[in-house]
Image (spheres, rainbow, N blue to C red):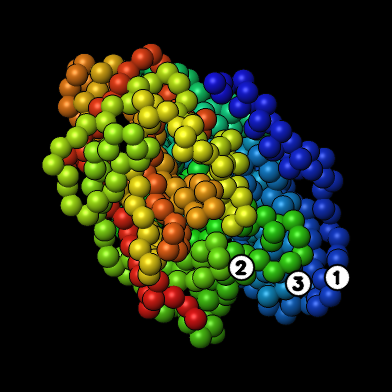
Amino acid sequence: MWNFAVFKRMALLFFTNFIGFSLMAPPARAVAWDLGLVTIKREWVRIPVDPGVELIGTLYQKRGLKVDGPLVILLNPWSIGSWVYGLQANALAEKGFTVLSYNLRGWAGSQGTVDNGGAVDVADVSRVIDWVSQTYHLDVSEVGVGGVSLGAGVALNAAAFEPRIRAVASMSTWTNFYTPIYGNSTKRVFWDAVLWLGSVIGTGSPAAAKLKDTYEAIENGDYAQIHEYADPRSPVFFLDRFAVNKPAILLSQNMSDILFPVSDVWTFFESLPVPKKMNLQPGVHATAEITGMFLPFKDKVWDDSIEWFERWLKPHHPSHDVMTSEIQVTLRDGQMFAAEKTSDLAPAKGRFYLERYTEGKTFGKLMSSASPSGIHTIESGKSSGVVSGLPLLGALVSETKIFGSKMKETSIRLDQAALYEFSVPDQGFRLLGVPRVHLSFRVHGDPATFITHLFRLDRKGAWHLMSMTPYTVRGQPNGSMQTVEFDLYGAFESFDAGDRLILAIDTQDPEFKQAKGDYTLAFDNSGGSWIDLPLSRIDSSAEIQ
């Protein structure tokens, strides 16, 4: 079983190469370098934001500009210094922007303690804008802010409170901080390691320590404490402020992101009362952005972000100030789909009921109508053989067309898992959206955790993980009947004839911390359990030719 110590080592290994460069990189002091088109001046700066607190950053400007361009601020990712934005900061400066990338409190040489996207980080953005105005005499009436991961969330929160922020490019962001750390009452094991790492690499964050204490308190049912921490850091709770400030918001999310699931960003996008665009592309957390941060190659995520800043910060842009709502999805096979609303991508909502098992069969059926009766019971305590793979890496492997889990149907323990299949018709179909699951079951034991997975089982027998979500039932009477509804993380996949869609429910997955003790779950397969799928025909008019 995976434990916290193992994940600490994994997290340390995962981030060591980035952190090492971040801490050892020398300050970039007033040097110039030629990109082949223009010469960009870089200036290393210290920004005073509070008594005894200075933030470290780099200012990028195009040499020879008669008028300084609009200000764009880039905020560092988790555990990595803002130096990683060097290539894109140069590209923005080349377009005439004045660019300031800086490290949030507690990261990569900036003073203060890590705030993890809270009110202190938000206030610092406003202080930094003031400092740029006073020091460089720039017009900061309309500013752009962007970032990846931690920087993405801070950019959104800052835009809710700072009216001078006109445009936001938020890449691999969270929108509800509660979901990734304790959504559906289930702990994410990797987040324990990430928070531990933050307390080590950051400058001794009391906030991170408090959140770790909150995790432990949740074991005893203390939900209020984590909401107290998470809600003030969640952009979804600031919709009324977005409605007042109306910043133009670009969201870019990777479809298999386990740390910050697409489902939350999807819901947030639907509710945003501002000019908005959402790009969804293959990848796990921050992988689609890495090319643009570390290699001098074209990167669609960053190219779209730069275009977004040009559109909303340069008054002569042909689409400047034009209200917009657009979503664009790029599948693994390169097909692209665009629509104005999320519902336009998959206008058909297919409801499939969980049908009872036939004796001797590995799978039950997903049917368009409810079956007359049936119960399938699963037990905790052992692995069923259905897994998402190594934490974070399982989804990454499933992103490829070549690889997939080679789980064998004959090795799956049916006393530990409930599996339901749907055979794809000849014309095929696509899933473009967020599936919603409705389950009725009788629970014996408290607490009880189950994980719902959605796979594409291709004709070669490879299992491709599309989506999953954990759920933990707590504090319910033994033997009681429970009904729950929840979203999966999002499913964006093309199915061809011969493929099968597999819904798998079991009690263990290395991504999540399961409930301790023995328990059983008896699922109602007589019409009380179903999954709603966002279906799109292969000939969908939303496809971009």
Q: Label 2 is placed on what type of residue?
A: Lys
Left or right of residue 221, residue 124 in this image: right
In the image, residue 162 lies at what x, y percent? 46, 56
Crowd around label 1: few <14 · some 14–19 · many ≥20 (10 Å): few
- Front residue of 207/516: it is 516
Q: Label 1 is placed on what type of residue?
A: Asp
User: Residue at image x 33%, y 26%?
Assistant: 378
Reply above or below: 178 against 351. above
- Front residue of 460/4: it is 460
Question: Label 2: which residue?
Answer: 300
Q: Are marks 2 and 1 in contact (CB under 8 Å)?
A: no
Crowd around label 3: few <14 · some 14–19 · many ≥20 (10 Å): many
Q: Secondary structure at mark 1?
A: strand
Left or right of residue 241, residue 530 in this image: left
Camera-nearest label, 2 or 1:
2
Query: In terms of sequence position, does the residue under pointer 2 or pointer 3 come before the other?
Result: 3
Query: In terms of sequence position, does the residue under pointer 1 or pointer 3 come before the other?
Result: 1
In the image, residue 25 lies at what x, y percent? 82, 45
Q: Label 3 is placed on what type of residue?
A: Lys
User: Farthest top residue?
Assistant: 517
What mark, if any, has residue 403 been given in the picture?
none
For residue 55, what is the image quadrant?
A: top right
Cα separation between marks 2 and 3: 23 Å
In the image, residue 534 lies at what x, y percent? 32, 59
Number of marks in the rendered image? 3
| Residue 137 visible to the viewer | no
| Residue 30 visible to the viewer | yes
Question: Label 3: which residue?
Answer: 62
Question: Label 1: which residue?
Answer: 34
Camera-nearest label, 2 or 3:
2
